[in-house]
Amino acid sequence: MNFKQTSYSVLIVSAAEKFNSSFKELFPESKYYPIQTETNLSAAKRALLEREFDFIAINSPFPDGDGIRFAIDICSHKNSVVLLLVRNDLYNATFYKVSPYGVYVLPKPTSRHVMNQALDWMASTRERLRKLEKKNMSLEDKMQELRIINRAKWILIDQLKMSEFDAHRYIEKQAMDRCISKKEIAEEIIKTYT
């Protein structure tokens, strides 16, 4: 997948209106859409309940907190990539707090060039997360298939008094003979005997 063609949704969390307007200029609509701005952490939390965002940029501090716990929580429970911008004198302390959780940190003020590099790093990370999400989904699908097949095997063991080996072999042979998946055979068995 070429992520240059991917569009990323963005949540900007910042109480500074001047920052918000200049920061939005870094996000061309061809690559970043939609872009939502919230001015406090409470509103940002509500926005995250409504939808997922690929990127979350947090311009610390806020009247209701510094955003550190918020950034950590997002990285711990969501598949969003988080960028936390902090004052230069707080950079080191903040970095050591949040880096174990995968939060990117930049000191303020920062240059446009550095911000563009950070956005590229965030895009790379988001694509890696997308691949992991797909892999996780396929593992969940396989686990669900195994559960269905095992349920069908236990039905054959209980109803037809087959051994586990014979039940497994029966499902495999039926799938091969009829050119359908073991899952479909298992579903037929479950439907027939329940």
Image (spheres, rainbow, N blue to C red):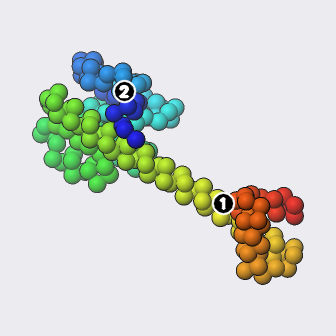
The residue carrying pointer 2 sits among few (fewer than 14), some (14 to 19) or many (20 or more) residues within 10 Å by Cα, namely some
The reply to whether residue 66 is in sight is no
Residue type indicated by callout 1: Glu
Residue type indicated by callout 2: Tyr
Label of residue 32 in the image? 2
Camera-side residue: 115 or 14? Answer: 115
The reply to whether residue 170 is in sight is yes
The residue carrying pointer 1 sits among few (fewer than 14), some (14 to 19) or many (20 or more) residues within 10 Å by Cα, namely some
Question: In the rendering, at what x and y percent does residue 174 appear?
Answer: 77, 67
Residue that badge 1 annotates: 145
Question: In the rendering, at what x and y percent does residue 10 appear?
Answer: 38, 30
Q: Is residue 147 left or right of residue 178?
A: left
Identify which residue is drawn at 44% across, 51% down. Answer: 132
Q: How many marks?
A: 2
Residue 16, relative to residue 164: is it above or below?
above
Q: Is residue 107 left or right of residue 80?
A: left
Q: Earlier in the sequence, mark 2 or mark 1?
A: 2
Question: In the rendering, at what x and y percent does residue 165 appear?
Answer: 72, 80
Q: Quadrant of residue 167?
A: bottom right
Q: Residue furthest left?
A: 89
Identify which residue is drawn at 71% across, 63% down. Answer: 182
Q: Is residue 67 left or right of residue 114?
A: right
